[in-house]
Amino acid sequence: MAAPRILLAGDVFGRLNQLFKRVQSVNKSAGPFDALFCVGQFFPDSPERLEEFMNYVEGRSSVPLPTYFIGDYGVAAPKVLSTASKNSANLGFKMDGLAICENLHWLRGSGKFSFQGLSIVYLSGRSSSEGQQFGTYSQDDVDALRALAEESGVVDLGVTTRASLADVPAEASDSSGCDPAISELVAEIKPRYHIAGTKDIFYAREPYSNTDAVHVTRFLGLASVGNPKKQKFIHAISPTPACTMSASEISVMPSNATLSPYTFEEQTGRLKEVTKRPGDSMSDSQYWRYDVSKKRQKSGDGDGLCFKFIYTGSCPRGEQCNFQHDMDSREQFRRGVCLDLLLKGKCEKGLECSFKHELQNEAENPPRRRVGSGSMTANRSKECWFCLSSPNVESHLIISVGENYYCALAKGPLVEDHVLVIPIEHLPNTFTLSQEFESELVRLHDSLQLYFQNRQKEAVLFEWVSKRVSHANLQVVPVPSSRAAAVPDIFNMAAKKMGFKLVSKKFDNILDRRKWLRTQFDENSNFFYAEVPDGTILTLSVDENEKFPAQFGREVLAGLLNMPDRADWRNCSLSKEEETSAVEKFKEGFKELDPN
């Protein structure tokens, strides 16, 4: 099979006429090409170009070949992207791009996908801690890419909006348009090609070797479309997919290859500090690399834990790393303890977090220090978000309490009246509780069903069972009765897009469903199940080494209800006053049905 032929373009700034005219010219003279990847800002930088841009989005002009973009900011970006997010064709997990119009695909956040054999990773937007909906990436996006970097296989193409300081040439003498986070990611992921924009120059760096890898990385920085200096804004490559190459082929070292700029910077960081001239400012970056000395200053006294070491058990920086390589914390992560809890001392995901929020096996091991806090308590329930005895439990969310289960409003609810059914005992799943207590769950289930049916809604229940789930929670989400028949189809479609197949079985009553579910549950595997309005149970067993989203059920229903932006509970957070009001409203309507 011939190697894919790829076109690359820099910041578009909405100049689609000029871009696609050039693409068609190149395609005619040197093509055909299989796809175009655009880095840097894709949307217009001024309202004057909006009409030209919207002609393509709305179908009046055609996009000549499959085009993928990551710079999701600029004029009209929120409107266009919000509309695309709600499109039924974009429901479910789509790391290979959300369709904006024919041949135009938005690579949102971060992800990894395969294109004609090429392994491609991307990070879209600019760094921001403010959690904006479009145009920025979050720490979660960065962490997701770090996790993807641990998967086997070589990454062929890495596309980012901004460059790392390591890849910027000397003529671009300011650090704007560079992102230090990119440096760490590129050093970890080691793509064969790294493509970036935002510096408004064309720069093809010499290939450089990678630490702990046999292949080299080639960096390409592309200028903006129509730039006044006539710098090159479009470039063609035709890389053979790494998955088809032999070890000898992929390890070929070009004659002009250099050392990794990241390794070199670590070696010279201290020398630069010593030899820095008086009066040099911190923005002076002669070597145009990620300045490790700056990072060292930002990290303070070095008390923080190394993400790479905690996640993988090793760190390529070794003794040069500015963060702690703590074996106790690494072991706790392997036992399913929340990474945010270990690294930051707290988890901001609240009740929706699928990881454990207390140290494991403390009875067998001496107490370990928690980052950012004093000594750890030996009582596991004190760290659990769901244990009623825990100081962390948000008691104002509680709706009803029984002998073995309680019901609470979901934190960051997908829709109004989204609730959780939670075992009172600290148990990892609802199957761990003795079967004799199922009758209480059945009564609560039937009462919730009737409550929603009285409001022209149907309940969808789902649970994610995993070794990393410390305290079980059964999610109950109401959907309009008019949409209930589509629920099985949307779950099956979403699973199929991710490469899984759900097992389906229908029952007349919940006791039979629960009995059957117990026969399907295997403690050695992760397990997802959903109960849909017609009484059908959908199940999926997932091996520990398989990637599956813990929030799959929520994300599928967000797609069904045309509210994909609410798939992330953090986009749905309410104030404590709003939560309290919602709980009191639910209680008032539920009081005559409450079995407790």
Image (cartoon, rainbow, N blue to C red):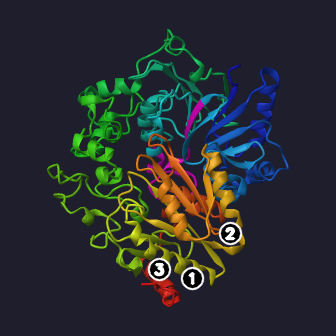
Q: Which residue is mark 2?
A: 484
Q: Residue at x 26, y 52 (%)?
A: 360
Please check the rendered image and state whether residue 63 is part of the magenta-colored stretch, yes or no: no
Expressed as whole percent of the image width and height from the top left, the position of residue 243 reads 57, 23
Residue depicted at x 54% and y 14%? 246
Front one among 450 and 287: 450
**Quadrant assignment, res 134:** bottom right
Instruction: Give the position of the N terminus as an image quadrant.
Output: top right
Residue 346: which quarter of the image? bottom left
Disc 3 marks a residue whose amino acid type is Glu
Q: Nearer the viewer, residue 307 or 430?
A: 430
**What's the amino acid at mark 1?**
Tyr
Point 71% across, 57% down: residue: 87
Mark 3 or 1 closer to N-term?
A: 1
> Residue 305: in sight, yes or no?
no
- Residue 128 part of the magenta-drawn span: yes
Could you say which disc has been placed on residue 451 in the image?
A: 1
> Is there any visible trace of residue 491 in the rendered image?
yes
- Residue type at mark 2 is Ala
Q: Name the side, left or right, on which 471 lies relative to 369.
A: right
Q: Quadrant of the C terminus?
A: bottom left
Name which residue lies at 52% across and 72% down: 418
Label placed on residue 578: 3
Mark 3, secondary structure of its residue: helix
Left or right for 211, reference 293: right
Q: Is residue 92 left or right of residue 298?
A: right
Q: Which contiguous range is marked in magenta?
A: 119-142
10 Å crowding of disc 3: few (<14), some (14-19), many (20+): few
Chain-order first, disc 3 or disc 2: 2
Q: Gap between marks 3 and 1, in whole Å? A: 21 Å
